[in-house]
Structure formats: C-alpha cells, structure tokens
Amino acid sequence: MMLAAMMPAAMPYIDWPTMVGFGGMGCIIWAYWYITARDAPNPFVQHGVNLMGAALLTVSLMYHLNLASLVLEGFWASIAIWGLWKAFRKRKAFSKRKNA
C-alpha cells in the first residue's frame, strides 16, 4: 500500500509552454556544445542560438513563472545581444580594412 502511494497516478501533462521551454533548453545546450566542440566557433551562430534559447525559455516562464529563472534569462539574452553586437562590429571593421 505504501509503494502505491508513492507512484504517480498518471504521466504528467506536458503543455505547449513546457515544450517551448524544452526547445529553449535544447538551444542553450547545443550552443554550449558548439562553442566547446569547435576550434573557431562562429559568434553569430553561438550568440544567435543562445538568444533564441533565452527567448523560448522566457516564453515558457511567462506561463510557469519562476522569477529567478526569468531574471537569469534576461541576463542570458542581454549577453547574447552584446555578443552579436560585438561580432557585427568586428565584421564591419574587417570589411573596412579589406576594402581599404
């Protein structure tokens, strides 16, 4: 009887915000793998995928609020935007030098 009380009655329902959150989690894990596996990772890919992951997780957190995680995703997105900005600036400077 005690064992039956510890077992869940049914598999938990996974709603669409949770699935979106899993997609965001996958993006962030993939971006971490990408930067670790590549000798010269493309910053547009790395930061772009990180930004997408933060955005998807933020959508999920709007439905299932966890304030600490929401704040973390805000910082994560901000750092990804900063990284993209730096990559665009670097590419623009390289293009100017190449054309000079």
Image: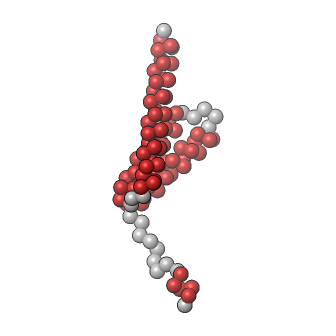
Q: How many marks?
A: 0
* Horizontal relation, residue 28 to residue 40: left or right: left
**Residue at 47% from the left image edge and 38% from the top image edge:** 79
Q: Quadrant of residue 37?
A: top right
Rendered position, 94 above or below 72: above
* Quadrant placement of the N terminus: bottom right
Residue 55 vs 13, above or below: the answer is above
Q: Is residue 74 above or below residue 69?
A: above
**Is 39 displayed left or right of 21 in the figure?**
right
Q: Position of residue 86 (x, y in %)?
A: 48, 28
Q: Residue at x 43, y 49 (%)?
A: 71
Query: In this view of the protein, can residue 37 be seen by the observer?
Result: yes
The answer to whether residue 23 of the structure is visible from this angle is no
Q: Residue at x 47, y 44 (%)?
A: 76
Residue closest to the far bottom: 1
| Color style of the picture | secondary structure
**At 46% from the left edge and 80% from the top edge, which residue is drawn?**
9
Residue 4 in percent (x, y) is at 53, 86
Q: Position of residue 74 (x, y in %)?
A: 42, 45
Residue 67 position by quadrant: bottom left
Extreme residue toward the top, this view: 100
Looking at this view, name the residue that lies furthest to the left: 63
Return the x and y of residue 72 as percentages of the image width and height. 46, 49
Given residues 68 and 11, the one toward you in this image is 68
Foreground of the two, 94 or 62: 62
